[in-house]
Amino acid sequence: MKRIQKKFKELALKKQKALVAFVTAGDPNLTLSEKLVYEMEKAGADLIELGVPFSDPMADGPVIQRSSERALKVRTTLHSILKLVSKIRKKSQIPLILMGYYNPILSYGVEKFCKNASAAGVDGLIVVDLPPEESQELHRPTRAHHLDFIYLLTPTADESRIQKVKKLASGFIYYVSVTGITGAKLRSLADIQSHVREIKKHIPLPVCIGFGIRSPEDAKHLSKVAEGVVVGSALVSELEKGGQKKGPALLVRKVVDLKKAML
């Protein structure tokens, strides 16, 4: 059984929901990114998303854009992120998902990237600028190398889009709770619940809600309507606020508070 699937099964048996924690790999450096993965796991994170820094992160708000800039300044690349994942795998089996844009994967070489990512211990990919209609080139090698391809569905997704994603998705569905950039304000809980129910009618995969979850209160309410929540900007902003000295402790404290609210 794949690590992502196994984690959701374990959580379901415990009647718990998944906290998916996002940090940008290489912000402020890869050594600290490695330590943060272990600390977030201890603090209650169930899955980790490692953001792949990119020079034009169009779906990201200012907090994650700045974290991408910091990571690029220290020359973080897809190669160095895969080395990071290999190091993490020597100490942890927490599910690891790479989240980013298609251009760095294309530059690396699609087949080569999927082979190397799988060998390093990556579990899944989220490629925010690759809709299902354009994803075949990446989808085939992800399947061949046993990587989960996690698709995003937005509040504007109609039934035909949901059906397209159903044919391709694995791991879980990432439901975007806002129609804007990461860190934007949430839509109403009733709207989100209605859309998640519609997705679950068609797709037999866990659903995790992301883009806009800022507080333990948000996580508490949204974890009641899906199998998990994804928190990114709220964690990255803690790291940014505290800097290298105080930031990690602030971020870990936030993870503790989020998970506690979801129990």
Image: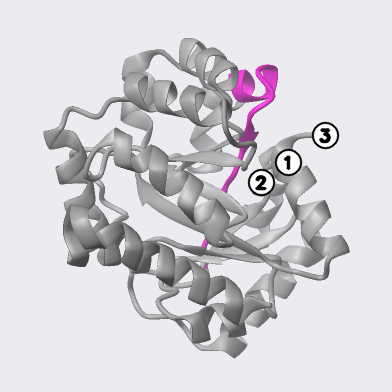
Q: Residue at x 30, y 34 (%)?
A: 30
Q: Residue at x 20, y 52 (%)?
A: 244
* Other-residue count near label 2 (Cα within 10 Å), few / some / many at <14 / 14–19 / ≥20: few
Q: Residue at x 28, y 25 (%)?
A: 77
Q: Is residue 190 visible?
A: yes
Disc 3 from disc 1: Cα separation:
20 Å
Identify the mark nearer the N-term, 2 or 3. Answer: 3
Amino acid at circle 1: Lys
Give whichever of 185, 36 is nearer the camera: 36
Q: Which residues are magenta?
A: 140-154
**Label 3: which secondary element:** loop
Residue 202 point in image, percent of width and height: 79, 59
**Label 2: which secondary element:** helix
Quadrant position of the N terminus in the picture = top right
Hey, which quadrant is residue 248 in on the image?
A: bottom left
Identify the mark nearer the N-term, 3 or 1. Answer: 3
Amino acid at circle 2: Lys
Amino acid at circle 3: Met
Give whichever of 74, 146 is nearer the camera: 74
Tell me the number on the disc at residue 167.
Answer: 1
Q: Are marks 1 and 2 in contact (CB under 8 Å)?
A: yes
Residue 251 point in image, percent of width and height: 36, 63
**Label 1: which secondary element:** helix
Q: Is residue 257 magenta?
A: no
Tell me: residue 254, above or below residue 163: below
Tell me the number on the disc at residue 179.
Answer: none
Q: Are marks 3 and 1 in contact (CB under 8 Å)?
A: no
Tell me the number on the disc at residue 1.
Answer: 3
